[in-house]
Image (cartoon, rainbow, N blue to C red):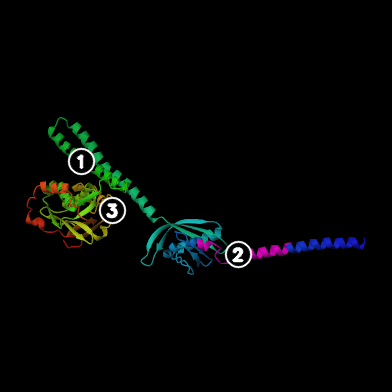
């Protein structure tokens, strides 16, 4: 073998060895970079920017459960950058994700905010993004679960409430048929049948009213309306009920106030408060309906001297089908929907309804609505209408006394 061949062979061998060495070096460098990336506790590039733009609570934590980066809404749940997450439940989910090397999902109740903290129902999802980093995101489903529970309760309560009068109507119909030869029994059963039918009609009507109020945000017949007109219509609609119960309805307070809305809806809302006040007031007592203006708000307060509502139940009286006194509500024919209708009707008009009550001393329900300016009476047609109006009849002296408003002691 001559020198040329030896040189060529040496060149080939050198190239092969050089290529092998280069491959080994590159593989070593890649392995080193991969190890550093896996062992590093640093947040991957771009993750912090994504977290800061998120509306949901989310964070990246390391092996010691210390928060490396977090979104703004994560702070109330204790996920603050540089601080270990305090929740043992969240730590358990992160631990599962790290050990399984895949996403872990669980529904938990987690405290939110500073003590006394409220408990929120959240869906937690933890995903490993490196050997030492875990990405955690929380989805708050508290309100969704509450609405779903309300829907289930509404369906169950509606079924139960409808079942009673429907069953009674069926039984009374059979009783009338079997007592066809006894006129006295037929009259007695027919009277009870009429009462149950009225109860069923009232319940159906109130369910429809509540559904209509919740179906749309728009108000049909919206106009400027006098509060005096609303109150007078509500009081007149329940005059017979008041006379039958031996209760006097007294109207007091300011006059000449105006609000904007649907007169029928607002009259029904005030009427429901008056009906409840009459039903829960003892015979011989009075129900006060007071009106006043305060900070551009018209307040319509209905006060009774009834049994009152325990403090622990006052927040629930506006729930559908909730009754503070089940037995009395059954006797008075209450449906448990009146106050719920009031709440939604007032909210539709941009207002609110509140309650003040003390057991044994009575209750005051107050509707607050935004005031509007009185209509301009410069229109000749309005002047002529005003001129033709009949003079108001004199009112009893008692009617001039303002009824107590919300917060006043009955």
Asked which secondary structure carries label 2, the reply is helix
Residue at the extreme top of the image, as rendered? 181
C-alpha gap between disc 2 and disc 1: 75 Å
- x then y, percent, for residue 120: 39, 59
Residue 328 horizontal/vertical position (percent): 20, 51
Q: As displayed, is residue 179 above or below residue 345?
A: above
Rendered residue at 65%/65% (across/down):
32
Q: Are marks 2 and 1 in contact (CB under 8 Å)?
A: no
Residue 87's spot in the image, x, y percent?
45, 64
Mark 3 vs mark 1, CA separation in Å: 29 Å
Which residue position is annotated with label 2?
Answer: 37
Which residue corresponds to the image point at 13% horizontal and 57% vertical from the top-left? 252
Q: Nearer the viewer, mark 2 or mark 1?
A: 2
**Residue 76, percent from left and from top:** 41, 64
According to the picture, the residue beneath numbered tag 1 turns out to be 198
Q: Earlier in the sequence, mark 2 or mark 1?
A: 2
| Label 3 SS | helix
Looking at the rendering, the stretch of residues picked out in magenta corresponds to 23-49
Q: Secondary structure at mark 1?
A: helix
Q: Is residue 132 left or right of residue 296?
A: right
Q: Quadrant of residue 183?
A: top left
The residue that label 3 is drawn on is 347
């Amino acid at each position: 073998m001559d020198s040329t061949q030896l040189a060529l062979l040496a060149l080939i061998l050198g190239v092969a060895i050089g290529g092998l060495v280069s491959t080994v070096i590159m593989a070593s460098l890649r392995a080193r970079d991969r190890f550093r990336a896996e062992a590093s506790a640093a947040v991957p590039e771009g993750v912090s920017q994504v977290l800061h733009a998120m509306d949901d609570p989310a964070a990246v934590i390391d092996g010691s459960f210390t928060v490396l980066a977090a979104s703004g809404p994560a702070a109330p749940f204790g996920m603050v950058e540089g601080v270990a997450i305090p929740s043992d439940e969240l730590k358990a989910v992160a631990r599962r994700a790290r050990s399984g090397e895949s996403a872990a999902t669980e529904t938990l109740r987690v405290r939110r905010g500073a003590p006394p903290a409220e408990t929120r129902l959240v869906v937690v999802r933890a995903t490993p993004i490196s050997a030492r980093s875990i990405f955690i995101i929380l989805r708050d489903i508290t309100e969704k679960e509450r609405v779903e529970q309300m829907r289930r309760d509404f369906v169950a309560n509606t079924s139960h409430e409808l079942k009673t009068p429907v069953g009674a109507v069926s039984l009374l119909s059979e009783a009338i048929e079997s007592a066809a030869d006894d006129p006295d029994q037929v009259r007695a059963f027919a009277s009870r049948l009429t009462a149950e039918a009225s109860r069923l009609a009232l319940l159906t009507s109130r369910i429809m009213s509540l559904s209509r109020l919740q179906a749309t945000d728009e108000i049909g017949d919206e106009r400027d309306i006098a509060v005096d007109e609303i109150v007078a219509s509500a009081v007149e609609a329940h005059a017979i009920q008041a006379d039958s119960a031996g209760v006097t309805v007294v109207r007091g307070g300011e006059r000449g106030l105006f609000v904007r809305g649907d007169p029928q809806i607002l009259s029904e809302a005030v009427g429901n408060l008056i009906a409840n006040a009459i039903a829960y007031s003892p015979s011989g007592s009075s129900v006060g309906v007071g009106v006043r203006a305060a900070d551009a708000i018209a307040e319509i307060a209905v006060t009774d001297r009834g049994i009152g509502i325990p403090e622990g139940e006052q927040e629930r009286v506006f729930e559908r089908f909730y009754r503070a006194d089940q037995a009395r509500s059954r006797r008075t024919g209450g449906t448990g929907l009146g106050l719920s209708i009031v709440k939604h009707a007032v909210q539709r008009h941009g207002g609110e309804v509140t309650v003040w009550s003390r057991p044994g001393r009575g209750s005051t329900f107050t509707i607050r609505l935004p005031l509007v300016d009185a209509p301009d009476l410069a229109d000749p047609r309005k002047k002529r209408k005003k001129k033709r109006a009949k003079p108001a009849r004199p009112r009893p002296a008692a009617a001039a006394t303002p009824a107590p408003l919300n917060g006043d002691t009955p």
